[in-house]
Amino acid sequence: MTFNELIFFMLSMVKQSSQNALERFFPQLRKEHIHMSQQAFSAARKKIKWEAFKELLETSVSGSYQEKYTLWRGFRLTAVDGSFIQLPSDPALIKYYGALGPEKTAATALASVLHDVENDIIVDAKLEPISRDERSLAEEHLQALMAMDDFQRGHRELILFDRGYPSYELVKSLQDKEIAYVMRVPKGFVSEEKLGSAIDRWVSLGKSGQAVRAIVVELSSGEKEILITNLEENEVEHAAFKELYHKRWGIETRYKTLKQKLELENFSGRLVDNIKQDFYAIMTVSNMLSSCVREADRKVKKEREGRGNRYEYQVNVNHAAGVFKDRLIRVVIEDDPIARRHLMKEMIREMERRVVPIRPNREVPRKGCNRKARFHHNHKSNC
């Protein structure tokens, strides 16, 4: 297996047993005569640093922003969120990442993602031990954002944060970097005495004295939540904040796609480096898939203009992920650029065939559930 073939194989979302995946991979390369054992694959992947896949993610980000993309009122709108990632039960992984559960036997890592919610692009991603805290990872996302070539060029940055992130230090860091933000804050973070009965007022935070704009938003349930921001009234009016903060839901759905449709937690190895390789490979694949879906969505929207449909429609991401997985290798191994472009068009055309309506203001209540592993490392699927 050449270096390129190894990378292609690991990007092809191997979610079945490695041996079965290898048997199906080489015929796609038109190399039916080659047979490779799982042990040989494991030895080969040890020669590749996991940082190589992180670089692939960075390349997918820069490539995505070379395409046509959407801004929100002149802002690149991103959101930060973390999520626990279930790992194979292995002592080495528990030692490195940590574990959850009553007896601390469920190996678990902490993922943190900076996600462009308007364009469905994973801008930066981290996989760390669960001993890390989300605020420090958010600060690392800020550094990665500032290192991008297009940082604050032709647009401004606006980041959405959930109520687990507010701190005086993070607010000061954002303001020092001149990055706009909207944070949902827990009760008591903003003094009720300073806010009073106002629904939109500039206040100072605690002993730090940092000036923030406090926004009171009423949810459909009647519950009131407080947002803080450094956006001026002439930049974003009060009435826009409820819809603006709701856009943070995009990062929740991205985690759902990563875990359920792309099977992020279905890892192909048990070593620390294997986990990181798979993690960044899936982040890269996610951006590649999003790029195809954006193109397919543009064509769906153009095709349905003037039809008088009750709802707008978008590509069914679950179907698109399946199409992408089935056809990715055929596209990337094609040397002829004209033939490769044709295969890409065919893949996107297939994605266009399955669409779902976009229902505005739809709310789906969260359901609590006990933690159960979705994938068992010793019982891989054969398909």
Image: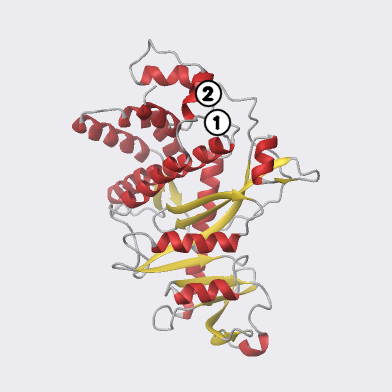
Image location (x, y in percent) of residue 27: 38, 17
- For image coordinates 43% across by 59% down, the residue present is 144
Q: Residues within 10 Å of mark 1 (few under 14, many from 20)?
A: many
Label number found at residue 18? 2
- For image coordinates 58% across by 35% down, the residue present is 266
Image location (x, y in percent) of residue 379: 64, 25
Nearer to the camera, 140 or 345: 140
- Residue occupying the far right of the picture: 103
- For image coordinates 46% across by 25% down, the residue present is 44
The quadrant of the image that shows the N terminus is top left
In the displayed structure, 321 sits above or below 37; it is below
Q: Mark 1 or mark 2: name the one nearer the start of the chain.
A: 2
Q: Residues within 10 Å of mark 2 (few under 14, many from 20)?
A: many
- For image coordinates 47% across by 79% down, the residue present is 230
Are the residues at dot 1 and dot 2 in contact (C-beta closer than 8 Å)? yes
Nearer to the camera, 69 or 22: 22
Residue carrying label 1: 268
